[in-house]
Image (spheres, rainbow, N blue to C red):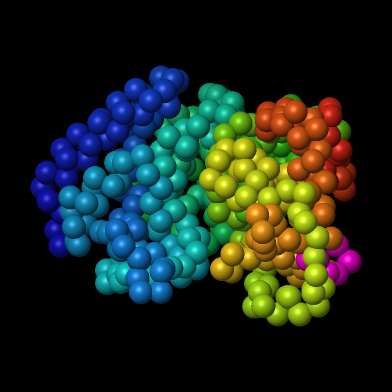
Amino acid sequence: MTMPADLDADSARLREAMTMALADDGALADPAWRAAVATVPRHRFVPGFYLAADQRDGQGLTVWEPVTAELDYGRWLAAAYSDTTLITQFDNDEPDWKAPSARHGGAPTSSSTLPSLVVQMWTAADVHEGHTVLEIGTGTGYSTALACERLGSANLTSIEVDPHRLEQAASALYACGYTPTLAVADGLYGYWPEAKFDRIVAACSFRAVPPALLAQARPGGKILLTLSGWLYGYARVLLTVADDGTAQGQLLPGTISFMSARTHTAPAFGNPAHWTADLPQTGRPARHSPERITAATEEAFHLRFLAQCAAPNAQMITVGKTLHLADVTTGSAATLTPADGQWQVRESGPVPLWQRIEHVLSAYDAAGTPGAETFTLHVHEGSQHLRHAHMPSLPLPRP
């Protein structure tokens, strides 16, 4: 299909409308970032993506419909200029956008992040003219293009672990006139050939701060990371690197999540029913409801991250009304089942998973339910701890 002759006019009109909407919402307070959003043609970076259908399939799975200009020009262009994350890949499987098909379920592994969040990340990292920047996770290249427009291509290095993703992003970037340094590389190790950097910004999440990133930041440089884990708890932190290579910084408020770096994704843990075989027949009343970390609230989002620090190797799944916790590294397990208006806990293995989480929840309550911004992450050689004045120190997993 040949693109409509009025694509340039249509995209310019929609881009202007998106820019105005983001500005009205307060997402573009910096005039320089507003100019970048108003300039970069997002549709050039998303030739194809998936949108969720209105109804699930017969097995309850989300049906993801492919969207391209060839399939539906209007839907494609409108979505490209909406403040929406556009999924471009599932399960590391590169789509054939010339003959795409619908997907049922699956785990997103690449996307074009919603523009307001992209700008929020660059702004939170305190990026300014003259800074040399490492971006981890090129993805579609849209975020990279915004940074190039703002800082100049010569100051930006962007790495991507997926060579197919990077090839497509590079084509779009170069076609738009942007020429940053691009490389296929694992964000866990940064990119030594271009180090050191004034700013390092990750568009993926890590279980702990990779030591290579500390070594590749200039003294006084800043690193903006999203921390995550196998309970899918998330927190953002802006670290400042000291002369001796240590770093510290406060957690940032908000409920932002990013896909895990592929080397930090949770391992498969098998059939939840197999983990119940060694559990005791009787349990004890839970001191805290699991809903404290599973509810769709900002506090639960924050608490899930704290719980994850207490049980970093635990994974969680709900089957029926029973919540299962499994730790593939130690063989520990726990279940929480509702009974007579309360939750019953059964645990086995060397690590009492729910008991550890309960201790953190009790300490959080005793400290007056402190927000994320009251916690500080301290990173020293071989040690990373989340600290609060009125709570026990919480270690992050070894990177």
Quadrant location of the N terminus in the rendered image: bottom left
Residue at the left extreme?
5
Q: Quadrant of residue 250?
A: top right
Taking 375 as reference, is 348 left or right? right
What residue is at 77 percent from the left and 56 percent from the top? 285
Taking 255 as reference, is 220 left or right? right
Return the residue nearer the eye: 112 or 158: 112
Whether residue 7 is visible to the viewer of this picture, yes or no, is yes
Taking 380 as reference, is 302 left or right? left
Taking 288 as reference, is 203 left or right? left
What residue is at 41 percent from the left and 56 percent from the top? 87
Q: Position of residue 90 (x, y in %)?
A: 45, 65
- Give the vertical position of 203 relative to 13 (above or below): below
- Give the vertical position of 99 relative to 164 (above or below): below
Q: Is residue 350 magenta?
A: yes
Q: Is residue 2 magenta?
A: no
What residue is at 47 percent from the left and 42 percent from the top? 144
What residue is at 35 percent from the left and 66 percent from the top? 56
Q: Position of residue 73 (x, y in %)?
A: 18, 54
Q: Position of residue 188 (x, y in %)?
A: 68, 54
Q: Position of residue 46 (x, y in %)?
A: 34, 52
Return the residue nearer the eye: 233 or 247: 233
Return the residue nearer the eye: 105 or 201: 105
Return the residue nearer the eye: 335 or 301: 335
Whether residue 238 is visible to the viewer of this picture, yes or no, is no
Q: Quadrant of residue 271?
A: bottom right
Q: Which residues are magenta?
A: 346-351
Q: How many marks?
A: 0
Residue at the front extreme?
340
